[in-house]
Amino acid sequence: MFKSEIFRTLSGIRTSLFFAVSLLFNVEVSAQQPTQTVWLDDLDLSSATQGYGVPKRNKSVDGHPLTIAGITFARGFGSHAASLLTILTEGKAKSFTAKVGIDDEVKGQKPAAEFIVAGDGKTLWASGIMHLGDPPKLCNVALDGISRVELIVTDGGNGEYYDHVDWADASFEATGVTGFKTYNPISSEPYILTPKPAAFPKLTGAKVFGVRPGSPFLHLVTATGDRPMKFSAYHLPKGLQINSQTGQITGVLTQLGTYMVLIKAKNAKGIAERQLRIECGNRIALTPPMGWNSWNCFAQEVSADKIKKAANALVKTGLINHGWTYINIDDFWENNRNSKDSSLRGKLRGETGDIVPNSRFIDMKGLAGYVHGLGLKIGLYSSPGPWTCGGCAGSYGHERQDAARYAEWGFDYLKYDWCSYGNVIDGLPGDDPYQISSLSYKGGDKLTTAVKPFKIMGDYLRQQPRDIVFSVCQYGMSDVWKWGDSVNGNCWRTTNDITDTWASVKNIALAQDRTAPYARPGNWNDPDMLVVGQVGWGNPHPSKLKPDEQYLHISLWSLFAAPLLIGCDMDRLDDFTLNLLTNDEVIEINQDPLGKQGTCLQTIGELRIYEKDLEDGSKAIGFCNFGIDRVDLSYQDFRKLGLQGRFNVRDVWRQKAVATIESQNGKLQIEVPPHGVLLYKFSPVTKLTHKY
Ligand code: GAL
């Protein structure tokens, strides 16, 4: 007998018993409690969360008829892994039935996914891993007494790519109701945590800055507080000077060495001072780069005009006063091989092989000068292959020339993106590397071929008369964290492209711990750019991450000592996003000079507790709730986090003292919203010696 038949028999017995008891007590039931079918597609599906696209009623995620293994269904829910729909059945559903599978619309791809039905937090049914072409699987689940049903689709263990998934012919048998409420357990209400900066001056930004001897020195001392503000620096080494109006330190250092400089910021309310450590040596980017990049909002629509606007906005919004520095142009500043947009068409290179920017970027040197004039730095993008990922001219065969040109223009940062390098590598005999190949990733997992193109460009960048941060972008192939430093890389992507979905942020976050031992000043693991604010790759919309998910995203990236590159339209920054990006105590965790990457030291259910060592002996601790239920617990495992002794605990988002805790027997009440975070700093309490 199939499970479903057992269920039907059992529920039959149960129903008869119920009627017998009802008759006994003379209760009238049948007329009031008819069983009816409630179709899933009649419910509000919009509260579902999914890895890509939006939930579709009676259609696949791409808008085609729902089709599994050649069978078409008129009704159902088309989604994309990772997907979650929560339905409040409140004990009124008797059963749920559906036919599940991967939609045929992704022919030629290799999706895999698992469908799960959970009731009140427990798995009631699971499909097992399903692949494209598998016949629809019948799901028939008893739901008596269940108040919350979750329809879940996981990525089947191979990532979410092309996981277009269908819950076809999906319906509930229910009593006494004609519909159910769906809901998203993650709150949509934005709330502000970062207190407004005080009027009194406060120095912000990195406490250490690295420069190579002979390179132009460019570092902005930043502070919050009332303007006008005057900056000064004491014990500046010979060759450097500070602009007292802007705080910009410029000049050139020729002597290797460590220089401790006392910097001061003064306004009508008072004066703040702090040490800045200048390291003149071989290493740069001694704290994770912070800034903005054009890709996540503008993609192929980028232009010099938009770059200037973003730079202006970084200044106008005050973000510059919190250490945000780089304005990075991503793909599409070059000419394109086949775009229909005439502003992207033109000679790829000049007579002598020099790269020719497209008509939206007629004056690269002028643009760099403009951005520098604001006290900011500027970056751009290329590929070691003949083509960038967007089909524009890459650097293949012109690496030396390109590196020299970037330096001559005055650029400070290069993101170098693998893409069509697959056309070039050994193993494709006779291939024209300029052909358009779909095998562009091939070979990237072989160590020698993976390293080679980055070594070439990394070496040329080092030969330039200015410091250029080298950002290696090849999505984490061949354990790049193990060799990124050997190609002069300052940061390297550890993952595929991020999207503004919970599934994407979560999966990226969960994969970071293995890279942690390789992070150090000048070498940063890069889990990709931030997805807060108006993002959308040419089609900007508010980030689909919920407010708590955004707090968690920024907290995790800070704990990871990740490069922080804002990816949103800077001209449309809302208060919530600005507040999220201007918390100096959170940024300080990211920019801590020790350069350690935080890792997860303990899990309690879906609560993951991350720890990052800080230079002053304190620890940043993130209580990160990856689950959909609120966490409410009395925490006392301080030893598991390496905490010994007495600690002052500070909530860095709220910038408030929380408690003083004894690690041995102390307790801390922890309340974390679903997909939310508590980010605390534990500072050892040093014994005070009082003078009487
Ligand atoms: C991708 C890269 C993105 C963006 C894009 C440009 O490969 O991961 O961050 O740079 O190329 O085409």
Image (cartoon, grey):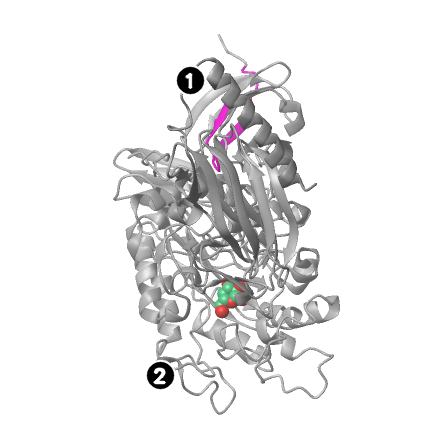
Q: Amino acid at mark 1?
A: Val
Alpha-carbon neighbours of circle 2 within 10 Å: few (<14), some, or many (≥20)?
Answer: few
Q: Amino acid at mark 2?
A: Ser
> Is 545 positioned to the left or the right of 353 in the image?
left
Kindly tell me whether mark 2's CB lies below 8 Å from ligand 1: no
Q: Nearer the viewer, residue 474 or 252?
A: 474
18 drawn magenta: no
Alpha-carbon neighbours of circle 1 within 10 Å: few (<14), some, or many (≥20)?
Answer: few
* Vertical relation: 394 (above or below) 250: below
* Residue 476 picture quarter: bottom right
Picture coordinates of residue 234, whole percent (x, y): 44, 44
Picture coordinates of residue 654, whole percent (x, y): 40, 30
- For label 1, the residue is 27
Picture coordinates of residue 342, whole percent (x, y): 35, 83
> Is 17 positioned to the left or the right of 49 in the image?
right
Q: Residue at x 39, y 61 (%)?
A: 297
Q: Are marks 2 and 1 in contact (CB under 8 Å)?
A: no
Q: CA distance from mark 2 to mark 1?
A: 78 Å
Q: Which mark is residue 342?
A: 2
Kindly tell me whether mark 1's CB lies below 8 Å from ligand 1: no
Region of the chain picked out in magenta, as a range? 669-688
- Which element is circle 2 on? helix
Q: Is residue 670 visible?
A: yes
Q: Which mark is residue 594?
A: none
682 drawn magenta: yes
Q: Nearer the viewer, residue 62 or 492?
A: 62
Q: Is residue 274 visible?
A: no
Q: Nearer the viewer, residue 563 or 375?
A: 563
